Image (tube, rainbow, N blue to C red):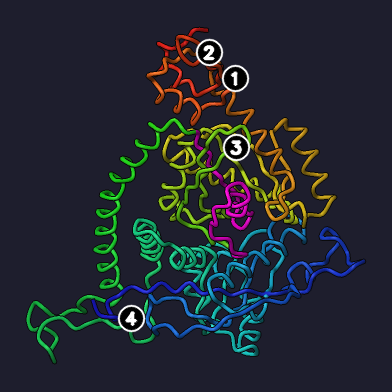
């Protein structure tokens, strides 16, 4: 397929700043109308990298662009809004863009025509011209009409948060299935947003070359948009067929895991909360650790041994994020299967974040949405508050109070320093004990394979040799106890 026929997604990261309220500034309730509607700049330093230009067509891969971020503050505090904007800036950097400026506007709800209102669009256009920005990124999902109106007014490319996240997933997906899922999500999102650039909207003449097609054939022919949508439909059908084939293979592997007697522990949480670092702290596995959003997209599994000698399997899953695009729910199927098929879920929270409870809420919303789609149920959960070495003591105190009040099982750890890892493993052992059966077995000397199995999958409390065989006091998974019921003496 030629480059002209390929559908290139342009998910450009733009981030903006706007003046943070100064000490002594009036509260939101006392601001007059002008202050409420003003664009506010967030002052922050951002990193940038350079990459090559993309194709100047409707669908193209993201290149490093100089971007401006814009958001609408409709609820929450100023600090929460600015934290959201900084997260959007981090997303833009992860996608490979350079953030020039960030702005947000106080509104009851986004403007249906231009998201921030025509007056503010004009101001934003002047800022775009002054800074030389390539793209403007909006912290929300834009409708097709809003996107067209904004591009016509600003004279630069416009993308929204959903397009940005989709592009990051496209860049980071490694497995064949992950790439196919993300590509399908991109195409589904872009199908209703297909639009042309410049002359690409012109119609193709029907009939013979150089004519209008003759009698009965005069007409506009197929538009460029119609052609793009036809190609999109064709590509989406192919991807869905490929994913159905991959699903069969995934179900076979899942059935094999279900037959395993080794306890399975899934690690889930907000992106960049330190899930991979936690696995490394518990297993020395060397899983990829990067200070970037969505560094892990494909689930990875590692085996670990607890202090009592019991083996467990830890699975690192993709991180979640607030306002996760609905098109990516399908792409989370493999992660969901790892979570729902586990015996225990470790919900990792970034304790150094300014609003960790918001992260927990976002993760719970995504898990609830995915479980509704699939009908799966979630396993028991232990909340792991990570990065306590970097956290604000006041924030940690608030978290302790919130979890104590809710009666939730929580452990505070630092995957970097190792603090709290021992306590976490003890809690895991205590939970796994509830899944075990405590028995005493007398195993003949001729059945050394059974003794080996008990040592590998159970916790041997005592062992002595008698005339009839080996007497073992052991705590082990119920399924193994049932398999060896003939040797149980008490």
Span of residues in magenta: 263-292
Residue most extreme to the right:
24
* Quadrant position of residue 120: bottom right
Q: Position of residue 473 (x, y in %)?
A: 56, 16
Determine crowd level at label 3: few under 14, some 14-19, many 20+ residues with C-alpha closer than 10 A.
some
**Residue linked to disc 4:** 201
| Residue 440 tag number | 2
Q: Position of residue 488 (x, y in %)?
A: 47, 11
Q: CA distance from mark 3 to mark 4?
A: 63 Å
**Element under disc 1:** strand
- Left or right relative to 70: residue 311: left
- Residue toward you, 457 or 49: 457
Q: Secondary structure at mark 3?
A: loop
Tell me the CA gap for discs 2 and 1. 9 Å
User: Sequence order check: which comes first, mark 1 or mark 3?
Assistant: 3
Does residue 57 appear left or right of residue 172 in this picture?
A: left
Of callouts 2 and 3, the N-terminal one = 3
Question: Disc 2 or disc 4, which is closer to the eye?
Answer: 2
Which residue is at the front of the view, 185 or 74? 185
Per the image, is 267 magenta?
A: yes
User: Which label is found at residue 354?
Assistant: none
Q: Looking at the picture, how far across and down is residue 30, in whole percent?
A: 86, 61
Sequence order check, earlier mark of 4 and 1: 4
**Which residue is disc 3 drawn over?**
306
Q: Which mark is residue 462?
A: 1
Name the residue rendered at 42%, 47% in the picture. 333
User: Seen from this angle, which residue lies furthest top?
Assistant: 489
Q: Residues within 10 Å of mark 2 (few under 14, many from 20)?
A: some
Residue at the farthest left position: 215
């Amino acid at each position: 397929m030629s480059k002209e026929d390929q559908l290139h997604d342009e998910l450009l990261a733009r981030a903006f700043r706007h003046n943070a309220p100064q000490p002594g500034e009036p509260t939101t309730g006392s601001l007059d109308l002008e202050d409420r509607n003003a664009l506010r700049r967030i002052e922050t330093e951002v990193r940038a990298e350079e990459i090559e230009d993309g194709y100047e067509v409707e669908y193209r891969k993201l290149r490093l662009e100089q971007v401006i971020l814009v958001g609408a503050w409709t609820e929450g505090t100023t600090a929460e809004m600015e934290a959201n904007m900084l997260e959007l800036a981090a997303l833009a950097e992860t996608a490979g863009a350079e953030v020039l400026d960030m702005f947000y506007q106080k509104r009851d709800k986004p403007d249906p025509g231009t998201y921030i209102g025509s007056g503010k669009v004009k101001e934003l256009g002047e800022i775009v011209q002054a800074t030389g920005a390539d793209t403007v990124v909006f912290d929300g999902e834009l409708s097709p009409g809003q996107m067209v109106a904004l591009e016509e007014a600003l004279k630069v490319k416009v993308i929204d948060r959903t397009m940005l996240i989709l592009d990051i997933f496209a860049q980071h997906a490694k497995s064949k299935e992950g790439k196919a899922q993300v590509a399908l999500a991109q195409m589904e999102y872009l199908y209703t947003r297909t639009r042309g650039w410049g002359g690409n909207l012109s119609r193709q003449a029907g009939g013979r070359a150089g004519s209008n097609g003759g009698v009965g054939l005069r007409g506009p022919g197929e538009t460029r948009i119609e052609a793009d949508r036809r190609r999109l439909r064709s590509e989406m059908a192919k991807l869905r067929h490929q994913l159905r084939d991959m699903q069969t293979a995934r179900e076979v592997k899942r059935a094999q895991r279900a037959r395993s007697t080794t306890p399975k522990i899934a690690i889930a949480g907000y992106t960049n909360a330190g899930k991979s670092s936690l696995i490394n702290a518990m297993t020395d596995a060397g899983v990829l650790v990067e200070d970037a959003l969505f560094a892990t997209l494909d689930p990875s599994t590692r085996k670990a041994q607890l202090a009592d000698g019991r083996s467990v399997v830890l699975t690192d899953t993709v991180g979640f994020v607030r306002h996760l695009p609905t098109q990516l729910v399908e792409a989370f199927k493999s992660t969901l299967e790892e979570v729902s098929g586990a015996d225990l879920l470790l919900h990792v929270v970034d304790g150094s974040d300014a609003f960790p409870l918001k992260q927990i809420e976002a993760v719970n919303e995504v898990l609830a949405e995915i479980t509704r789609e699939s009908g799966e149920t979630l396993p028991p959960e232990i909340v792991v508050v990570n990065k306590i070495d970097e956290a604000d003591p006041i924030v940690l105190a608030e978290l302790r109070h919130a979890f104590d009040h809710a009666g939730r099982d929580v452990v505070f750890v630092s995957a970097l320093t190792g603090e709290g890892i021992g306590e976490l493993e003890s809690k895991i052992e205590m939970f796994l004990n509830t899944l075990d059966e405590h028995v005493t077995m007398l195993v003949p000397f001729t059945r050394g394979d059974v003794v080996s199995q008990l040592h590998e999958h159970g916790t041997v409390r005592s062992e002595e040799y008698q005339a009839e065989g080996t007497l073992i006091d052991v705590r082990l998974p119920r399924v193994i106890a049932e398999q060896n019921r003939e040797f149980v003496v008490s």
